[in-house]
Amino acid sequence: MQTAEAPYDADGALPPIPAKRYFTIGEVSGLCAVKPHVLRYWEQEFTQLKPIKRRGNRRYYQHHEVLLIRRIRSLLYEQGFTINGARNRLDTAGPMPRERPAPVEKKLSDGAIRIRLQEIRALLKRDA
């Protein structure tokens, strides 16, 4: 069961990152299980984290920044680093490990959808 404190799976896995170009601070907060005020604080502490600011100073994060936030979260919350330790680790570490992209659903043609619906209808008639 998910709570407001833990918006991730029971096994601790964070939700997959959607294939979008920009994310709001609220979306990133949910994707990384970190509150928005913490994200704003991390922007001051980690020079690598620089979201784009538009219209009224609204923050827009890109995919690579979401991955960076997840890495910072892991260093601080899971591996027990301090802010300084995490900053040093990010400065000395190589490139971030690539996250596998979320699977993309195949688009079915109209004909394939009709065939699938006919199969489902036949199954329902058989069970009725």
Image: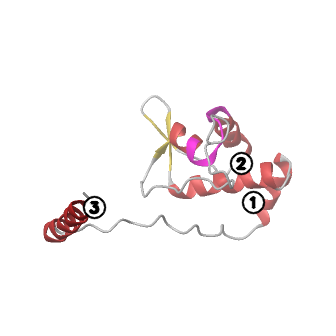
The residue where tag 2 is placed is: 46
Disc assigned to residue 127: 3
Does 38 appear above or below 62? above
The amino acid on which the numbered mark 2 sits, given as a three-letter code, is: Phe
Point out residue 95 in the picture as x, y percentages from the top left corner.
66, 69
Gap between marks 2 and 3 measured at Cα: 60 Å
Q: Which residues are magenta?
A: 30-37
Q: Is residue 97 left or right of residue 22?
A: right
Q: Residue 44 sits in which quadrant?
A: top right
Give the residue drawn at x 54%, y 38%. 25
First-in-chain label (1 vs 3): 1
Compare residues 48 and 33 and report the one nearer the observer. 33
Point out residue 60 in the picture as x, y percentages from the top left corner.
49, 43
The residue where tag 1 is placed is: 90
CB under 8 Å between discs 1 and 2: yes
Point out residue 88 in the picture as x, y percentages from the top left corner.
82, 57
Q: Residues within 10 Å of mark 2 (few under 14, many from 20)?
A: some
